[in-house]
């Protein structure tokens, strides 16, 4: 088993090292890192904007590039949070707590250097986990019938919407909305049109790109325009020399880094608990076992490396259910899965055996890409730091162009640009009402497959809903769903939410509720 | 007990009340439209079955969200949040929404260069510190790079410059 995995990995390196693939991996990592550094651009917006560029590529190159974009943007986001105290992506919210004070003390470079290192360690561990666990998971998943697939999806959707961020019930509402949006268009089984309102352009359903760019592009720009505080570049003067940690700092960072890695990889195994939860749990743990917890928040290196290692380890781990079961854990993974589907690849347990080049190539490229990132981030730090100073008023109009042309390029159709306007406006209303739109994407991507499997399960069981609890594996998933809902209701009734950490509250825009939520989940 | 009018006013000020209300309306719309499609039986589900069920579920969730918003709030301050941000940016919002509209119009009738320029130009006007010169420069720069990237490099099949192309 292990031997075959290693053999396949060897093959994967062969795929990833083909010059063509290597180039796209590099481009993805570079562009992802660059865009991720820009304040206000998280991985979701970055991937959605760059997704249209991959349409003309071969599936392997496209997914390698998008994977590169994703973890490149993660690295970039850490720079933005440590130097500017602006978490563009929720997992980085805790990195700010100790990262920014370090910057203020003039040790921002060290924080960045060790972050790069910690991220690499975390990611490597996550990749290793992926190599050995995915084939095991696939072997189990190949036994699944439609009923099991259905209840597993239900569990994934519930976990993704209740544990992620904000109010759980609102998250579930967003997932339901996403499932509905996924059903718009021609019904696969009967061929009848649903909810197209007479528009033939909607026959093929709502365009994934339009949905993603509307929700994470336009709606976000509307949320941030003229609201972004002027960027304070007072502390951002960091060069290569500042990045080298002293021996004592390295020693202090060593164990927190490994603890973060382990926590991240454990979080990746629980469906729905993505990098955000991993980073919060890591920070909380580090604080708890520290001999001087009162010093956290004043610029401790432990408080930076532990959550960063956890984030990266869990991001890589999140690929396990996404690639081996076809069930994404969060919106970023849903988007990557959607990109695969655009390329005509059916996600699910058969993916690894049918497209070994994609899976093993991706795994190998993670390693290559992460090494590239370490090599890139050290010499290019000066450029990244300069990019932090690009004002938002140049950023969002340029991004608007990428949104428009990207949606147009998906099908060469102006109708979809219209779609993105409507979805963007609607998405902003949802944001203002306190909804987080990420679960919409999760529901949207899984919706059609959920419906298909549900129908099949019902057909096989002759319309008997009991099939979901009668089959043992499915029953376990259903029980977990019930447990999840039950615990949420219990927490709700118990009422007392722990106070949100004040420094997180300042950032607004949805990062604030995360803290309280996660602490509840952590305990 | 407070008089009922002020209770109602309290309710309206709550964000979750609107949030739940919106979900109820959306769910109702989905479910009602869904009943016009064939529902079928559990064994042979028709196209209307799942969407209708989702609509009903959304209505229930909406009621729960609204009800939670009405309940005497344990969490305090968070519930008082208004729907509009502190400084509403009507002009900027309008510009951002109009930017793709300009892209559609100019793209359809005049080609990629005018479409790109107008799209960036309109969006950039939304910023409170925007100047005419700065906006024009930004739009020009993005147009040059954008057209080079998408038209020459990525071969997006949109004419670069045309006159009333699609009429």
Image (cartoon, rainbow, N blue to C red):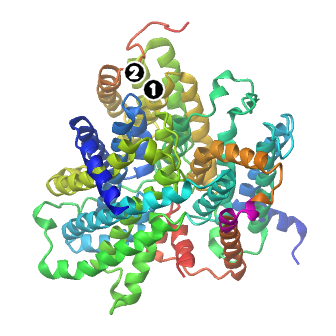
Does residue B128 appear in this view? no
> What is the quadrant of the C terminus of chain A in the image?
bottom right
Which residue occupies 59% across, 54% down? Answer: A439
Q: Nearer the viewer, residue A7 or B53?
A: A7
Res A409 label: 1
The chain that hosts pointer 1 is A
Q: Which residues are magenta?
A: A468-476
Q: In the picture shown, does residue A282 fall above or below A315?
A: below
Judged from the image, the secondary structure of the residue bearing numbered disc 1 is: helix
Does residue A515 appear in this view? yes
Residue B106: give x, y in percent of width and height.
48, 18
Q: Is residue B51 left or right of residue A287?
A: right
Which residue occupies 63% across, 61% down? Answer: A155
Which image quarter: residue A49?
Answer: top left
Q: Are marks 2 and 1 in contact (CB under 8 Å)?
A: yes
Crowding at label 2, few (<14), some or many (≥20) Cα neighbours within 10 Å? many
Q: Quick check: is A475 in the magenta stretch?
A: yes
Q: In the picture shown, does residue A83 fall above or below B124?
A: below
Judged from the image, the secondary structure of the residue bearing numbered disc 2 is: loop
Res B156 label: 2
The chain that hosts pointer 2 is B
Q: Is residue B159 left or right of residue B5?
A: left
Q: Are marks 2 and 1 on the same chain?
A: no
Q: Quick check: is A282 in the magenta stretch?
A: no
Crowding at label 1, few (<14), some or many (≥20) Cα neighbours within 10 Å? many
> What is the quadrant of the N terminus of chain A in the image?
bottom left
Cα separation, mark 2 vs mark 1, equals 6 Å
Residue A407: give x, y in percent of width and height.
49, 31
Q: Is residue A118 left or right of residue A151?
A: left
């Amino acid at each position: 088993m292990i031997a075959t995995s290693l053999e396949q990995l060897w093959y994967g390196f062969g795929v990833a090292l083909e010059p063509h693939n290597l180039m796209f991996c590099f481009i993805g990592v570079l562009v992802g890192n660059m865009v991720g550094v820009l304040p206000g651009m998280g991985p979701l917006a970055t991937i959605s904007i760059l997704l249209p560029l991959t349409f003309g590529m071969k599936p392997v190159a496209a997914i390698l590039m998008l994977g590169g974009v994703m973890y490149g943007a993660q690295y970039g986001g850490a720079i933005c949070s440590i130097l500017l105290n602006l978490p563009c992506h929720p997992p980085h919210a805790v990195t700010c707590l100790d990262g920014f004070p370090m910057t203020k003390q003039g040790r921002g470079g060290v924080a960045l250097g060790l972050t790069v290192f910690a991220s690499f360690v975390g990611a490597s561990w996550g990749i290793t986990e992926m190599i050995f666990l995915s084939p095991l998971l696939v072997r189990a998943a190949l036994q699944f019938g439609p009923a099991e697939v259905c209840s597993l999806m239900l569990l994934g959707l519930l976990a993704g919407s209740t544990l992620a961020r904000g109010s759980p019930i609102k998250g579930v509402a967003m997932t339901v909305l996403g499932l509905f949006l996924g059903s718009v268009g021609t019904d696969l089984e009967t061929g009848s049109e649903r909810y197209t309102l007479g528009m033939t352009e909607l026959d093929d359903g709502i365009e994934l790109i339009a949905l993603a760019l509307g929700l994470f592009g336009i709606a976000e720009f509307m949320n941030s325009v003229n609201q972004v505080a002027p960027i304070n570049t007072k502390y951002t003067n960091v060069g290569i020399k500042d990045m080298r940690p002293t021996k004592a700092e390295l020693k202090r960072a060593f164990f927190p880094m490994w603890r973060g890695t382990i926590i991240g990889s454990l979080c990746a195994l629980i469906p729905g608990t993505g990098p955000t939860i991993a980073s919060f749990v890591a920070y909380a743990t580090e604080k708890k076992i520290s001999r001087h917890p009162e010093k956290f928040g004043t610029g401790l290196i432990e408080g930076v490396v532990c959550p960063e290692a956890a984030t990266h380890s869990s991001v890589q781990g999140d690929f396990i259910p996404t690639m081996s079961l076809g069930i994404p854990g969060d919106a970023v993974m849903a988007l990557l899965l959607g990109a695969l589907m655009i390329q005509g690849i059916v996600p699910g347990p058969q993916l690894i055996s049918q497209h070994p080049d994609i899976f093993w190539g991706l795994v190998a490229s993670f390693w290559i890409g992460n090494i590239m990132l370490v090599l890139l981030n050290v010499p290019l730090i000066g450029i990244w730091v300069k990019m932090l100073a690009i004002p938002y008023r140049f950023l969002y109009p340029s991004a608007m162009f990428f949104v428009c042309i990207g949606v147009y390029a998906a099908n060469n159709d102006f109708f979809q640009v219209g779609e993105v306007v409507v979805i963007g406006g609607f998405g902003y209303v949802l944001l203002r009402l306190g909804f987080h739109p990420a679960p919409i994407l999760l529901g949207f991507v899984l919706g059609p497959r959920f419906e298909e499997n549900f129908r099949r399960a019902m057909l096989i069981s002759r319309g008997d809903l009991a099939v979901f609890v009668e089959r043992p594996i499915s029953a376990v998933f259903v029980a977990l769903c019930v447990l999840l809902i039950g615990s949420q209701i219990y927490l709700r009734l118990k009422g007392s939410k722990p106070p949100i950490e004040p420094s997180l509250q300042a950032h607004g825009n949805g990062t604030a509720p995360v803290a309280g939520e996660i602490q509840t989940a952590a305990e | 007990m407070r008089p009922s009018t002020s209770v109602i006013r309290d309710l309206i000020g709550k964000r979750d009340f609107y949030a739940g209300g919106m979900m109820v309306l959306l769910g109702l719309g989905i479910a009602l439209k869904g009943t016009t499609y064939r529902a079928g039986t559990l064994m042979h589900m028709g196209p209307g079955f799942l969407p209708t069920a989702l609509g009903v579920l959304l209505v229930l969730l909406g009621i729960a969200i609204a009800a939670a918003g009405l309940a005497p709030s344990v969490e305090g301050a968070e519930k008082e949040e208004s729907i509009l941000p502190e400084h509403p940016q009507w002009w900027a919002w309008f510009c951002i929404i109009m930017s793709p509209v300009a892209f559609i119009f100019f793209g359809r009738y005049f080609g990629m260069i005018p479409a790109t320029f107008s799209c960036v130009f309109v969006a950039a006007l939304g910023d409170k510190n925007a100047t005419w010169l700065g906006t024009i420069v930004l739009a020009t720069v993005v147009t040059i790079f954008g057209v080079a990237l998408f038209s020459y490099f990525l071969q997006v099949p949109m004419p670069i410059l045309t006159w009333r192309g699609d009429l």
